[in-house]
Image: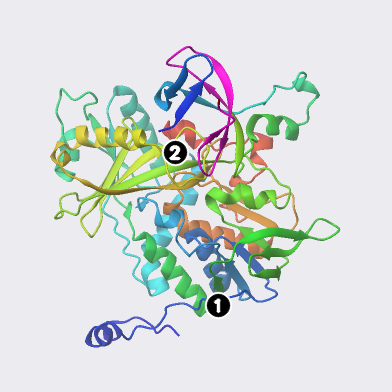
Amino acid sequence: MSQRFSFLSLVHGAVGGHRRWPAQWRSPDRPASAYDVVIVGGGGHGLATAYYLASEFGVRRVAVLEKGWIGGGNTGRNTTIVRSNYLFPASAALYDHALKLWERLSPALNYNVMFSPRGVMMLAHSDHDEQMMRRHICANRLAGVDNEWLTPAQAKAFCPPLSLAPDARYPVIGAAMQRRGGTARHDAVAWGYARAASALGVDIVQGCEVTGIDRDATGAVTGVRTSKGSVRAPCIGVAAAGNTSVVMAMAGLRLPLESYPLQALVSEPVKPIFPCVAMSNTVHAYVSQSDKGELVIGAGTDQYISYSQAGGLQILTQTLEAICELFPVFRRLRMLRAWGGIVDVTPDRSPIIGVTPVPGLFVNCGWGTGGFKATPGSGQVFAATLARGEPHPLAAPFSLDRFITGRLIDEAAAAAVAH
Amino acid sequence: MLLIHCPHCGDRPELEFRNCGEAGIARPADPAALDDAAWSAFLYVRGNPRGRHAERWRHVHGCGRFFVLHRHTVTDRFEDVP
């Protein structure tokens, strides 16, 4: 089974030409017949949930059922940006909880997730933008989340490729900067959690699609049916991202979710030129540079619901136009590839974490266009929710019934875009 | 980009259209008679099927007309289009 990584183990692996590395997690062909908790969905959120269930809450009989391969959905399709500068206190608390876990994640998992707090800079292009961002900065600082205002010159000094051209259609008039934000290696997050969870006894079953949810006479869940046989479990946690509506329909539930394609693309690799993450809500573009040298660029969602994992070319074009205007130095870069993921979006653009009307069935969904950054925090509070049967205090505001009580957490209005 | 069949203008590029969500959502005749859960369902809960989906479109940058089309949400192909 997987050994502990250390300097010596890396030297040993290198001397062996990297041919001696064993599989890093167990991947049983079939699930066992019964578990204490079944997690539906083997992305970052599901794997993190399983890891924290086993490591912090002592629940070792856990299965993660993944219909494809782990980390093959939105975990492998995002732009790897990590930040916590959300406007509302409930959001800031949840995302900053995640950011604090990111900061210690590599040693905690003994796996290098390549978390790089290189700074996330959000650009302002109008007086309205500036007013909103300054308010945002104040709200963040009151909530204990770092955020600061940069003048255009300071923004340019921090991010030299940025154009300050005064004749730009949307000139840069300042920026909000969260220095603790940055990027992480998305695949490593899935693999690191899988390895650590597997070492604690969690079964990770790939190619295992959940096809039904079994319930007893009282309505409580008793297990799931899968493409690899039935599994009994008194507690089911659904972390199926864009396919959450499909899974929850198996229990007769309709959630306030709609699934949209969200696209991203990368350029050909170039030498290090882009030192931070830059985002602009006004022109809708965000960009960073991966350690391989590719520019990683995020586009927006399409306007219609879809499960196609592909979106319209006009969405990418619009984003690239914005990138070329903000960073003219990139105008002759060629784009290497583009892809789409399916994101589940709630009416208020905040996630749903917690109990459902079906006893024993829990859901962690609605992360929309911004779930990657929350992966450790999401997993930890969802694991606490599953283990205790009631919401973790940080998850409590993100209940499903907020759409009935009216206590929305309207980050859609706060950010004015999908985020 | 989708090629969308407007019943008035014919096949036009998606850029000219606004998607207006699930078709067939009627505002309750007497909202005061509804409990909070039913009102919430009207406001926020929509079909999100992996398969055939009835949706409204509006030809905002054309004739302005609202109309309903059926689309398969995995292939994105419109169904029943003449």
Residue A142 falls in which quadrant of the image? top left
- A43 relative to A398 in the view: left or right: left
The answer to whether residue A6 is above or below residue A211 is: below
Q: Position of residue A38 (x, y in %)?
A: 64, 66
Q: Provide the chain ID for the residue under circle 2.
A: A
Q: Amino acid at mark 2?
A: Leu
Q: Which residue is mark 2?
A: A87
- A103 relative to A157 in the view: left or right: right
Q: Position of residue A214 (x, y in %)?
A: 75, 61
Residue A282 falls in which quadrant of the image? top left
Between residues B67 and A77, which one lies in front from this camera angle? B67
Q: Could you tell which of marks 2 and 1 lies nearer the N-terminus?
A: 1
The answer to whether residue A104 is above or below residue A84 is: below
Count of all numbered marks drawn on residues in the image: 2
Q: Residue at x 27, y 82 (%)?
A: A18
Q: Are marks 2 and 1 on the same chain?
A: yes
Give the residues in magenta: B56-81
Q: Position of residue A237 (x, y in %)?
A: 63, 60
Between residues A289 and A319, which one lies in front from this camera angle? A319
- The residue at the far front in this view is B82
The answer to whether residue A271 is above or below residue A129 is: below
